[in-house]
Image (cartoon, rainbow, N blue to C red):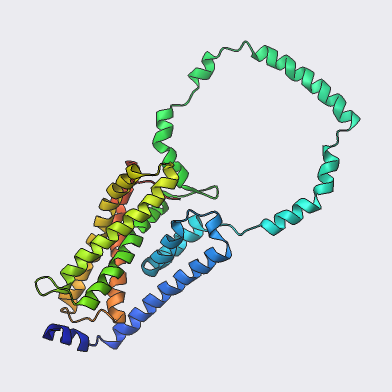
Amino acid sequence: MDSHDMMSMSYQPPLSLTVLGSIFIGIAGLISLFITQDIIRRKGWRSMMGVMIPVYILNALYLGPLTLWTYWNYGRPTLPDDTKGIQSMSHHHDKTEDAEKPSPTMESHTEHDMSGHQHTLEEDHGMDHSKMEHGTMDHSKMNHHSKISHAQMHGGVDRPMFATVTVAVCHCGTGCLLGDLIGEWIVFGTYAKINGREIWVEFLLGYAFALVIGIFFQYWSIAPMSGEYGWKTVVRAAKADFLSLSFFEIGLFGWMAIFQFAIFGEKLPMDGVVYWWMMQIGMFLGHWTAFPINYWLIKEEIKEPCA
């Protein structure tokens, strides 16, 4: 441990920054806990795409209110209604049986309607099928928009493109969050450095872990939506996540360089509240630097829009 490390360990940021950092991290933590309990209470694993559960929970740690808004309006599962459904079936069981018994009047009407229906079918048999061909939809246009349209629906409610792109960015954001957490603590425990600076190791490890984890999350987003599993989807996930994650890290790493070098002069200890508040701000900025590229990836159908 050199003199720089000793200085970093002895440095104490202003109390006001510690209080502010505690407030921001605390609010984000409460939002994450709320989403977690809401998913558990609603048994979200029954109806949600599995990968979305950790995505919402983890992204709330830095995207707070925006994650809550997206989850609440476009990702929240409905309450389980099994008991109510069983009671309703039992209550109407007898009525259903009575309703299924045809009355004499119904039988006479049924015979009359069937004869009319048969006559109509005979007339329609000679219909010109060229009209059907003329009215057939352009399947290439349907395929161009089908994936985006499907992903922009949740519970029968249209999801705006803003929310669709937000969810897409959150996938790579989850990988970045976990990857940087792992990388940061490895550097903290090993004092690893490049050219006497820990930040370069943090960048390398954070990016590497984030890419691996991000591809994992991206794979389990693309595969269930497309129905294709295997190496082809792994490659597709890697292509989509490489661009998305790289643009995310531009915002995060750029802010890390600013607060490490320009604001705190590399004195801010990593095991303090202010450091992780700075990281929270960096991930928030990373979300927005990754937003435009995710919009393009979805429009070009390189990245699967997520449910």
Q: In this view, does 267 lie to the left or right of 16?
A: left
The answer to whether residue 42 is above or below residue 130 is: below
User: Residue 137 location in percent, x, y?
Assistant: 47, 26
Residue 245 seen: yes
Q: Based on the displayed image, in which of its 4 quarters is residue 87 positioned?
A: bottom right
User: Residue 237 location in percent, x, y?
Assistant: 32, 48
Q: Which residue lies furthest to the top in this view?
A: 126
| Residue closer to the observer: 24 or 192 | 192
| Residue closer to the observer: 181 or 244 | 181
Measuring 43% from the left and 62% from the top, which residue is drawn there? Answer: 54
| Residue closer to the observer: 273 or 120 | 273
Measuring 24% from the left and 60% from the top, which residue is drawn there? Answer: 208
Measuring 55% from the left and 47% from the top, which residue is drawn there? Answer: 156
Q: In this view, does 289 lie to the left or right of 74?
A: left
User: Residue 185 location in percent, x, y?
Assistant: 27, 74
Residue 289 seen: no
The answer to whether residue 158 is above or below residue 127 is: below
Q: Is residue 235 left or right of residue 90?
A: left
Measuring 31% from the left and 45% from the top, which residue is drawn there? Answer: 236
User: Residue 27 location in percent, x, y?
Assistant: 42, 75
Q: Which residue lies furthest to the right in this view?
A: 104
Quarter of the image with the N terminus is bottom left
| Residue closer to the observer: 296 or 184 | 184
Q: Based on the displayed image, in which of its 4 quarters is residue 42 positioned?
A: bottom right
Q: Based on the displayed image, in which of its 4 quarters is residue 302 positioned?
A: top left
Q: Is residue 168 left or right of residue 201?
A: right
How many labels were placed on the picture? 0
